[in-house]
């Protein structure tokens, strides 16, 4: 399990995330590339919230292949293409995570390779090392 780090000597998080996360020695690490809100069949949801949900579903699928789940995420980097997408993204993120909360960064960017994308999320997860 990982341990959230939120020292009282710095400003507390603005939302549901930790200022830092300590990963126990011997944990397996999985680094997920940025996931866009695109389904396997190529469909793209029309809202930032639906795209964020699909991004997290895609991350969950990557983690499942490694025997992990969203509860193992220790770090999230998220990007939205406009300020109006901040709240929908955060609402989706906050609904999917509980203590211990991952460390998280959220940035507004000028856009993605295709204009229909509003959200991209990358993640790092840590979990029990497999017995091989």
Image: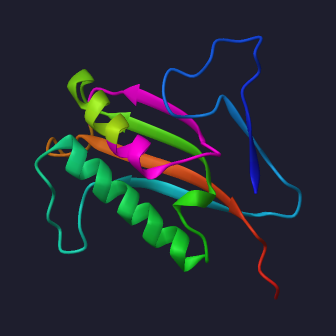
Magenta part of the protein: which range?
A: 92-111
Q: Nearer the viewer, residue 39 or 6?
A: 6
Q: Nearer the viewer, residue 59 or 49?
A: 49
User: Residue 53, percent across and down?
Assistant: 30, 54
Task: Please state if 114 lies on the left or on the right of 35 as rendered.
Answer: left
Q: Quadrant of the N terminus?
A: bottom right
Q: Is residue 77 above or below residue 109?
A: below
Q: Is residue 96 above or below residue 82?
A: below
User: Residue 46, percent across and down?
Assistant: 10, 49
Task: Please state if 114 lies on the left or on the right of 106 as rendered.
Answer: left
Kindly indicate the quadrant of the structure image that contains residue 115. Answer: top left
The residue that appears at 54% across and 78% down in the rendered structure is: 65
Kindly indicate the quadrant of the structure image that contains residue 27. Answer: bottom right
Kindly indicate the quadrant of the structure image that contains residue 25. Answer: bottom right
Q: Nearer the viewer, residue 123 or 109?
A: 123
User: Residue 32, percent across and down?
Assistant: 53, 58
Q: Which residue sits furthest left? A: 46
Q: Is residue 119 above or below residue 71?
A: above
* Magenta-span inclusion, residue 90: no
The residue that appears at 26% across and 36% down in the rendered structure is: 88
The image's colouring method is: rainbow
The residue that appears at 39% across and 47% down in the rendered structure is: 95
């Amino acid at each position: 399990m990982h341990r959230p780090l939120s020292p009282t000597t710095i400003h507390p998080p603005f939302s549901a995330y930790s200022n830092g996360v300590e990963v126990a020695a011997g944990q397996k690490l999985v680094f997920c590339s940025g996931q866009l809100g695109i389904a396997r069949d190529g469909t793209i949801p029309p809202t930032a919230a639906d795209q964020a949900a699909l991004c997290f579903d895609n991350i969950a699928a990557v983690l499942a292949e490694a025997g992990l789940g969203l509860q193992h995420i220790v770090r999230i980097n998220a990007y939205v293409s406009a300020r109006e997408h901040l709240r929908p993204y955060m609402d989706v993120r906050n609904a999917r995570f509980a203590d211990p909360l991952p460390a998280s960064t959220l940035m507004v960017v000028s856009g993605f390779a295709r204009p229909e994308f509003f959200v991209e999320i990358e993640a790092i997860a840590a979990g029990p090392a497999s017995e091989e």
